[in-house]
Amino acid sequence: MPRYVFHVRTRHRLERDKEGGLFTSADAAHVTAIMAARDMAVQDQLSGTLDREKRIEICDEGDRCVATVWLTTVAGL
């Protein structure tokens, strides 16, 4: 199974995922990233720190970005 990593990018920084996870496909990784983004958006909204530019970049083993999940999109903002 291919490994995908979920880098979190904000307006001011990039937090690289050093471990990632094994997924059956890029679509499976995308579903996981959507769930993670929803959780992050809720936590950020509750703490009043939601960055409208915050997103999860799903990257393959070669560190090529295959998809992006914006927190504002999954939070319905």
Image (tube, rainbow, N blue to C red):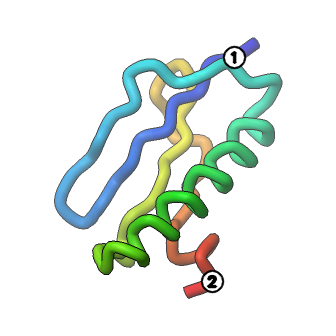
- Residue at 53 percent of width and 35 percent of height: 59
**Amino acid on which disc 1 is placed:** Pro
Q: Position of residue 17 (x, y in %)?
A: 40, 30
Left or right, 24 with reference to 64: right
Say what secondary structure mark 2 lies in. loop
Total marks placed: 2
- Residue at 18 percent of width and 61 percent of height: 12
* Closer-to-camera residue (26/32): 32
Residue 76 drawn above or below residue 49: below
Q: Real-space Cα distance between discs 2 and 1?
A: 30 Å
* Mark with earlier residue (2, 1): 1
Q: Position of residue 45 (x, y in %)?
A: 42, 77
Please give the residue where the numbered disc 2 appears in the rendered image.
Answer: 76
Q: Which tag is nearer the camera, tag 2 or tag 1? A: 2
Residue 18 drawn above or below residue 43: above
- Residue at 60 percent of width and 22 percent of height: 21
Q: Position of residue 3 (x, y in %)?
A: 62, 19
Q: Are marks 2 and 1 in contact (CB under 8 Å)?
A: no
> Which quadrant, please, contains the N terminus?
top right
- Residue at 45 percent of width and 19 percent of height: 19
> Which quadrant, please, contains the C terminus?
bottom right
Determine the residue located farthest toward the left in the rendered image: 12
Q: Residues within 10 Å of mark 1 (few under 14, many from 20)?
A: few
Determine the residue located farthest toward the top in the rendered image: 1
Please give the residue where the numbered disc 1 appears in the rendered image.
Answer: 2
* Closer-to-camera residue (35/64): 35
Say what secondary structure mark 1 lies in. loop
Residue 14 drawn above or below residue 29: below
Q: Position of residue 42 (x, y in %)?
A: 51, 69
Left or right, 42 with reference to 35: left
**Amino acid on which disc 2 is placed:** Gly
